[in-house]
Image (spheres, grey):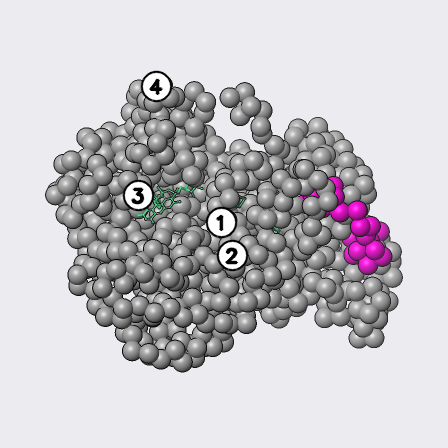
Amino acid sequence: MELQVKNISPNNFEQCIKCTICTVYCPVLSVNPDYPGPKQAGPDGERYRLKDPEFYDKALKMCLNCKRCEVACPSGVKIGDIIQTARIRYDHHRPGLRDVILASTDEMGSIATKMAPVVNTMLSLKPVKVIMDKTIGVDCHRTFPAYAGRTFESWMKHKAPDQTVYPHKVSYFHGCYVNYNYPALGKDFVKLMNAIGYGVELLDKERCCGVAKISNKLISQATRDAELNIRSIRAAVAKGQPVIGTSSTCIFTMRDEYPHVLGVDNADVRDSIYLASKFVHELVDEGKVKLVFRPDFHRRVTYHTPCHMQRMGWAIHSVELLRMIPGLELVPIESACCGIAGTYGFKKENYATSQAIGKELFDSILNASVDEVVTDCETCKWQIEMSTGVPVVNPVSILAEALDVEATRKANGL
Amino acid sequence: MIYDTIIIGGGLSGLVAGVKLASAKKRVAIITSGQSALHFLSGSIGLLSAVDGEPVSDPIASLEKLPENHPYNKIGAGRISSMAGEAADILKAAGIVVDGNAGETRYRLTPLGAWEPTWLVMDGIASCPHPSKCPWRKATVVNFHGYLDFFPEYVADGLREAGIEAECHEVKLPELVRLRKSCSEMRAASIAKILRGEVLRKLAIELNALGGDSEVLLLPAVIGLKSMQETEELQAMVKKTIRYVPVIPMSVAGVRAQSMLRNYFEKLGGTYFLGDSVSRGNFSDGRLESVHTANLGETVLEADDFILATGSFFSQGLVAKPDAIVEPVFGLDVDQTAERTERYDKNFFAPQRYMRFGVETDKEFRVSRGGKTVANLRAIGSILSGADPLKEGSGAGIALLSAVCVARKLITLN
Ligand SMILES: Cc1cc2nc3c(=O)[nH]c(=O)nc-3n(C[C@H](O)[C@H](O)[C@H](O)COP(=O)(O)OP(=O)(O)OC[C@H]3O[C@@H](n4cnc5c(N)ncnc54)[C@H](O)[C@@H]3O)c2cc1C
Ligand code: SF4
Ligand code: SF4
């Protein structure tokens, strides 16, 4: 009996009852029989790997880390975590140039923003795409997100004095995408928060959340970045400021992958790391904040649940916020993986799998005939826009657009 | 967030209760940790097929032989018929086609070719009102080349014993052979993902080419994972009647039922939180006020009424600890024997006492905690005590009827 109590692994792998439910919901297995599937790659394989690392199967790199298997498992087995940890522990293959480039969002971003017009033109040229395809294996069908000419951080520097006037404060984890590619989302966030009485500050220092480095196995760099981020988050929380992001993947990585995959302890601050839609929805739900919307806003949209959003179980917050907008018609679609999984879909060898996985989702989006798709993840945005042609926006941007700022400020006593 | 009713557990019982309440315009949320036991439901729903080892031909007349605390006795013989009819109607409203009538026994064809008594039979699964009234004189049992979870010769032998002529055939589809790449993955659900569109048309051609003078084609139940569309399409293209025989789980009919019920529930306006677990509750004055979940952190979910539908040991609605069986969410009172050694019989095939363990409830399915009834928390489905679903063939019947019974009560109460 004592043995029973002691026999508990961090990833719950001994709880697997071999029911195979997880295999029904794995998007990769559905389109690619070369992948062993979550049960085999996860808890089953782990039993062998614990006996002898030779049993490591390099097919595990096909896992998207979407965690749909974990959401389905009735026994609480952390299948995705088992697979990612095994890749880190047993796969000694060093990442090549392409993987390093794709994963180094911070490093690439800071160079590229300085030369944005040149880089954007270069990356969109057919010959350049073909060369990247042939030399480093970045699939030529992919469109790189454009780099902004000026980073969000530098914009925020000018805004800092305005932010001191608000009764409450939050720290914003903007992430690489907002900083280098799409500062507009960050600006929408500031607009929304200001309207409800919250000033926005940046963290002392911020590095990429590390999701791309983790999936490309640049683990020591990812761990360094994670430690720096958690130090900054701690400093913000010590000042009484919750830390809020607008990308579900960054937030998921910092809350769950840091402790589970990188072994970076965040227990003291985990509950202070929020996604914007969760933070705002809770304030509204508790009656602490009011939102007033413009009567002339009309839009037909659908909400796509990113895999990591599904794992966190927070899609409800975004959906409930959208439902509050009177002029918004929300068409429900069945949750499915878009297939991109961060840098996965950019790799030549994964392009076909990536598009096959997404097909179900693309079809239901096209059938829904909506003006826009709303989602909390930027890589889903690239994939859906490229594959369906339907524009994709973050819920924060929709809220910022639909908001009657003056009326909202007044309703919140500003 | 505030609801009229919160249902904990989204398996058969939770979903059916949710659908009924949402149809009555209640604000309902279902929170569920993972997928459910429906994934193993072979396609037939048992009401009561045996008592004390004796087969039952008239379930309602046999209720009095069941123990006093059996869920059916709490519902009462007088109401079982009407509730059974209503449960079947709810399934039909969700698009799940079932054969059979309340209170009447129907016979389904087992994977071993025997006719087994049951109640409702889903979507084209081979069944008949009585083995003596079997509608076919000759049957063709068809398997897919390479598929090992279905045993056509067993089925044929069984049929021959019952005086039906039977022959076996195999069809070879290259798209399915590809699945054999991973030795463990030529499974029911993965086949169902492929048997669509063009592949389905090829299958129809193969089936029509079989010829012969049999009246029915018996196929393994591996078609139609999300809806009935594929089985209908196939039947439209094939001249002979097609019926399906259950295979080793995953049960495609069960997965389909799960997804159809969930979609219907959401269409009626219900909120379904998949992949979140209720972790604890806040009680006051003998009532459950609100619950916490793993994903929502500090946010509580409040409701007037709560329904506990977390299933039995398989779904962790009940957990066996070395010294006792516990209900892990709220620590409710559990009907069980005190001594560990009395929980089970060493003869594996004998009735096992632990099968009858479950949460203690009053006549209205209200649970108790520390000996005191909780006024607004009711339990339904396989977490209830008093039944041995395996020996009685009553599992899905109890889930359906207790769900309808409790939902009716909540609708009349408020
Ligand atoms: C392997 C197997 C095969 C079966 N085959 C048949 C059959 O062929 N015919 C038949 O009539 N019956 C069959 N049964 C019985 C029948 O399927 C079940 O009795 C019935 O489906 C139970 O439904 P339920 O809703 O009570 O529970 P479940 O289906 O077990 O659902 C419970 C749900 O609650 C969730 N949950 C648990 N804890 C929490 C929590 N803390 N917070 C949130 N959610 C939680 C679980 O994840 C699960 O999704 C079978 C049962 C099993 C286990
Ligand atoms: S769903 Fe969970 S318990 Fe079932 S096989 Fe997969 S990991 Fe194991
Ligand atoms: S994380 Fe996603 S891709 Fe990886 S095994 Fe699980 S379901 Fe499959």
Per the image, label 1 sits on a secondary structure element best described as: helix
Which residue is under mark 2? A335
Is residue A307 visible to us here? no
Query: Is mark 4 in CB contact (under 8 Å) with mark 2?
Result: no
**Image quarter in which the N terminus of chain B is found:** top left
Q: Amino acid at mark 1?
A: Ile
Subunit ID for the residue under disc 1: A
Residue sitting nearer the eye, A23 or B343: B343
Which residue is under mark 3? B395
Is residue B205 visible to us here? yes
State the image coordinates of residue A89 (x, y, percent, origin top left): 74, 41
Q: Determine whether the beta carbon of the residue marked 1 sits less than 8 angstroms from the nearest atom of ligand 2.
A: yes
Residue sitting nearer the eye, A299 or A87: A87
Do marks 4 and 2 share a chain? Answer: no
Residue range (magenta): A84-107
Mark pair 4, 2: CA separation: 45 Å
Q: Determine whether the beta carbon of the residue marked 3 sits less than 8 angstroms from the nearest atom of ligand 1.
A: yes
Mark pair 3, 1: CA separation: 19 Å
Per the image, label 2 sits on a secondary structure element best described as: loop
Q: How many C-alpha atoms fall within 10 Å of the one at disc 3: few (<14), some, or many (≥20)?
A: many
Q: Is residue A104 magenta?
A: yes
Q: How many C-alpha atoms fall within 10 Å of the one at disc 1: few (<14), some, or many (≥20)?
A: many
Subunit ID for the residue under disc 4: B
Mark pair 3, 2: CA separation: 29 Å
Query: Is mark 4 in CB contact (under 8 Å) with mark 3?
Result: no
Subunit ID for the residue under disc 2: A
Per the image, label 3 sits on a secondary structure element best described as: helix
